[in-house]
Amino acid sequence: MAETTTRAAEPRGFRSAELGWPELHRIPHPPRRLPLLGDVLGVNRATPLQDSLRFARQLGPIYRRKAFNREFVFVWGADLVADLADESRFAKHVGLGVANLRPVAGDGLFTAYNHEPNWQLAHDVLAPGFSREAMEAYHPMMLAVAGRLTDRWDREQAAGRSVDVPGDMTKLTLETIARTGFGHDFGSFERDRPHPFVTAMVGTLTYAQRLNSVPFPALLRRAAQRNADDIAYLNRMVDDLVGARRAAGGDGDLLDRMLETAHPETGERLSPENVRRQVITFLVAGHETTSGALSFALHYLSRHPEVAARARAEVDRVWGSAAVPGYDQVAKLRYVRRVLDESLRLWPTAPAFAREAVQDTVLAGRHLMRRGAWTLVLTPMLQRDPEVWGADAERFDPDRFDPKAVRSRPPHVFKPFGTGARACIGRQFALHEATLVLGLLLRRYELRADPGYRLSVTERLTLMPEGLRLHLERRSGSGATAAPVADSDEAPAASESRCPVSGAGD
């Protein structure tokens, strides 16, 4: 049933493509479409994103797929995505998978509808928490958590065991966002099994994705009960965390901003319910995607020893004999950052974002869209478009992010953090953390891949390499045997470079 599209009552929930694309018949779809079932032949319920990439290669830069009674339009062509980045005509659309997370995240920053006032309120209140000054204050805690990781990896290396890269990166990034943002320690590195928070989080993400692939949610009755239990656990854990903070007083972190800071212009504060939703959003989004990015980067470094050697030489040169790097020294790891960017190009861990028309318009001068019509941008295909990235776009090559190469490409072709005003507010936090950790690991270890391993990607709305284990060799010499970092409240010296948070552009 068609929904109203007035500004007072924005469209929400799922809208099939035929409601918003008047010339849908002009957009190709897979062959062998079945009555009632749609385009389901040859697809795997566990790998919807990778199936979508396969169809993209077959059908071109814009195509459609139908699953049961739902029709979707997918876009990845560079000119189409550049047009969708126009904030005067398009806005974030809370797509089906993201909307499925609203029972747990509600109107948090990631899952809020554009018309919900708490999104802008929370963004304005929390944006200073990602300023340069705030980032410098987080840096010592990031170092402390990285020291717990290297302690663990030293023990595994000494015992001759390989390391579980995705598992350990998840522990690292969860502890980092929990400690820097909320003053909480999950004790992840002291556990043999994932913390129950991680188990519940993975459960909710997996359930949200499964909902996309069934015609009737009632078919997932038992899974729905497990999901309700997972949500209840997440809510209880966050309520306890917030309650402890209210009782103990502030640390000046993100949680304090949520609890104590009023909007600078309106004087509004976040409600207790919205604080809970924002905490859950940051804990989930603040570690799940970064752990995937680090895991993919470590995979590629282990498979490309010449790249690892070049990155390691940069770390040794820039950090020298310093026991630990200062905040400003991380940004100087320009080649390490290219490694990270190239990993995010091939496997952006948040692999799609949706855009909707805020007015009747024509996409790239070719496709009519009614107000409220939406499309899903396939970020991995956008970032592998051979017309932009070359005939070898599937090849791992960090020099694609050499400044000269970056300047030669059109805008809006690299979008691992989304686009526009609703792009990831914490992207500078994630990039600093990931670059720092890669530098520390390269400085300390030689990374050896398992010759028999072939990259397999698991999907749960986010992407993660599955079953990735690496063998380690301790380095000798320059900085490789520096002691693990102890907790410290002393911030490193500042540099003059500025760290932007977010804005309407990219």
Image (cartoon, rainbow, N blue to C red):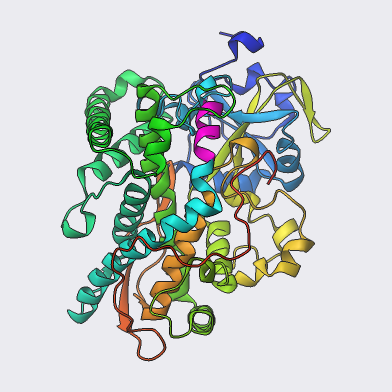
Q: In x, y percent, where is residue 215?
A: 41, 22
Relative height, residue 283 to residue 115 (above, below):
below
Q: Is residue 335 left or right of residue 62?
A: left
Q: Nearer the viewer, residue 189 or 328?
A: 328
**Does residue 288 belong to the magenta stretch?**
no
Q: In x, y percent, where is residue 54?
A: 56, 48
Q: In x, y percent, where is residue 195?
A: 21, 47
Regarding residue 482, the answer to whether it shows in the image is yes
Quadrant, the N terminus:
top right
Q: Residue at x 70, y 18 (%)?
A: 371
- Picture mark count: 0
Q: Main secondary structure of the magenta part?
A: helix
Q: Quadrant of residue 225?
A: top left
Q: Which residues are magenta?
A: 119-127
Q: Is residue 87 left or right of residue 206?
A: right
Regarding residue 348, the answer to whether it shows in the image is no
**Residue projecting furthest to the right:** 365
**Does residue 122 belong to the magenta stretch?**
yes
Relative height, residue 402 to residue 168 (above, below):
below
Q: In x, y percent, where is residue 77?
A: 71, 45
**Residue projecting furthest to the bottom:** 477
Relative height, residue 177 to residue 141 (above, below):
above
Q: Residue at x 39, y 55 (%)?
A: 291
Q: Quadrant of residue 256?
A: top left
